[in-house]
Image (spheres, rainbow, N blue to C red):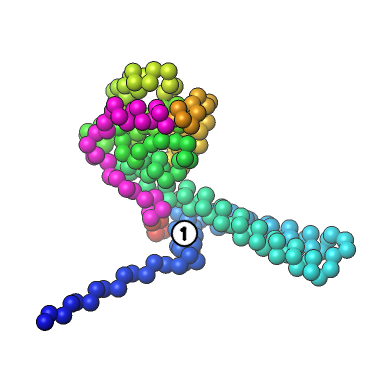
């Protein structure tokens, strides 16, 4: 009777503290100045708690302890908030300029009010420059990735297509590049939310469904499933 071969044990996932340390290390390597922001975020509330505990009149030992404890807890909270923001920024800086980077932002960093896809709706064959589409309360936004000069025809075609299908919906264009009027990758969500509100939530869903049902994206020449939080910072030389 053949014996069943034992299955290899699954690799144990790192604990929460280890994950936080890995994110902190990645962020520090990508942006050495982030250490000062971390210190300010934690030390500032702690110092404030100590000062309030010592300077406010009529304090007993319990009140002093609570003030200091509140400062420490607030410092930890602010540290985690700053870590999340700077870690996301550092992660996106590692994939900026790569095909599919805009799709990673659209699938990971947009609020629920947006409807988008990590796959582009148009691709320039030679350069792999791409056009992505998102639908939100400002209307329809076309986002370019790569050399915008290669995408003028694709952007114009997508704009005409959207205006034909949903003629009363505003169409905006955002360029992700290093030009003066372009936006960097980590500022893309902010740039998309700066436009004036034109649709409500129900209209956003209806417009997105209509566009998806009547248009089809290109065969994927762009990598799918890029996870910016798995990007590793390059080691300093």
Q: Quadrant of residue 116?
A: top left
On the image, the x and y values in percent for residue 207 come to: 40, 27
Q: Residue at (18%, 77%) from the top-left corner? A: 4
Residue range highlighted in magenta: 205-231
Residue, disc 1: 23
Q: Residue at (52%, 31%) from the top-left corner? A: 194
- 168 sits to left or right of 124: right
Magenta stretch encompasses residue 182: no
192 or 4, which is in the foreground? 4
Name the residue furthest left. 1
On the image, the x and y values in percent for residue 19 come to: 45, 63
Crowd rating for badge 1 (residues with CA inside 10 Å; few <14, some 14–19, many 20+) = many
58 or 23, which is in the foreground? 58
- Determine whether 31 is above or below 200 in the image: below
> Dot 1 lies on which element?
helix
Is residue 165 at all visible to an observer of this figure? yes
On the image, the x and y values in percent for residue 69 come to: 70, 65
197 or 175, which is in the foreground? 197
| Position of the N terminus by quadrant | bottom left
């Amino acid at each position: 009777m053949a014996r069943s071969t034992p299955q290899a044990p699954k690799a144990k996932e790192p604990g929460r503290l280890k994950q936080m340390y890995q994110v902190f290390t990645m962020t520090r390597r990508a942006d050495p100045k982030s250490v000062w922001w971390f210190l300010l975020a934690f030390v500032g509330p702690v110092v404030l708690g100590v000062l309030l505990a010592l300077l406010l009149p009529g304090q007993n030992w319990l009140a002093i302890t609570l003030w200091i404890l509140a400062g420490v807890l607030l410092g930890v909270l602010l540290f985690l908030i700053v870590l999340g923001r700077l870690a996301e920024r550092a992660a996106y800086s590692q994939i900026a300029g790569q095909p599919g980077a805009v799709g990673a932002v659209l699938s990971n960093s947009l609020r629920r009010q947006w409807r988008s896809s990590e796959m582009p709706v148009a691709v320039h064959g030679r350069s792999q420059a791409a056009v992505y589409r998102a639908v939100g309360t400002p209307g329809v936004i076309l986002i370019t990735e790569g050399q915008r000069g290669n995408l003028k025809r694709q952007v114009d075609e997508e704009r005409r297509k959207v205006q034909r299908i949903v003629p009363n919906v505003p169409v905006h264009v955002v360029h992700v590049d290093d030009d003066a009027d372009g936006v960097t990758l980590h500022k893309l969500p902010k740039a998309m939310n700066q436009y004036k509100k034109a649709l409500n939530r129900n209209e956003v869903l209806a417009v997105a469904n209509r566009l998806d049902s009547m248009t089809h994206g290109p065969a994927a020449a762009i990598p799918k499933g890029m996870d910016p939080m798995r990007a590793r910072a390059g080691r300093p030389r």
